[in-house]
Image: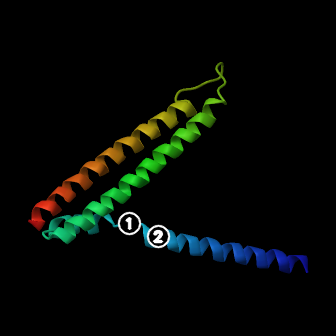
Amino acid sequence: MRARIQIALALLAFALTSGIARAESANGTNYSRADLKKMVHDAHTPEQYRVLASYYRMRQQQFADQAHDEIVWSARRSMNVSLPAAKYPTPLDSSKNRYEYFNYEAQRMSQQAAHYESLSASAAQ
């Protein structure tokens, strides 16, 4: 009886997580590198430029979220520093490097989005 309940709970948890994963993938469209390259090459209308701009804004938000998460992890890691046995790179250094990377990528995505937004505005005129 107890095994049946555990199996039912496991199946329920699996169903819920797969539904959440499907909903997240539907909201955030991730294009492959080849698809994105083709979209950039074929973009000539304001609507195509808007699609590219919205994609880059979505990626910017993802990188900004990851940078924020890294700040949180950095604060947690800073509490667990043992100085005599510390080796480089320390977990704190790794967090800092990851934060800088995510911040850089967010800025780059913002620049790309702004570029396609300006192309969209100029193509609409």
In-image side of 22 versus 28 (left or right): right
**Quadrant position of residue 16:** bottom right
At x 43% / y 54%, what residue is drawn? 62
Up the image or down, 26 lies above or below 79; here it is below
Amino acid type, label 1: Asn
In-image side of 33 versus 92 (left or right): left
Q: Are marks 1 and 2 in contact (CB under 8 Å)?
A: yes
Check disc 1: other Cα within 10 Å, few if <14, some if 14-19, many if 20+: few
Up the image or down, 82 lies above or below 111; here it is above
The disc label shown at residue 30, or none: 1
Q: Element type at marker 2?
A: helix
**Quadrant position of residue 55:** bottom left
List x then y, in percent, for residue 79. 66, 30
| Distance in Å between CA atoms under marks 1 and 2 | 8 Å
At x 61% / y 30%, what residue is drawn? 78
Amino acid type, label 2: Ser
The residue labelled by disc 2 is 25
At x 71% / y 78%, what residue is drawn? 11
Q: Earlier in the sequence, mark 1 or mark 2?
A: 2
In-image side of 68 versus 104 (left or right): right
In-image side of 6 versus 97 (left or right): right
List x then y, in percent, for residue 74. 56, 36
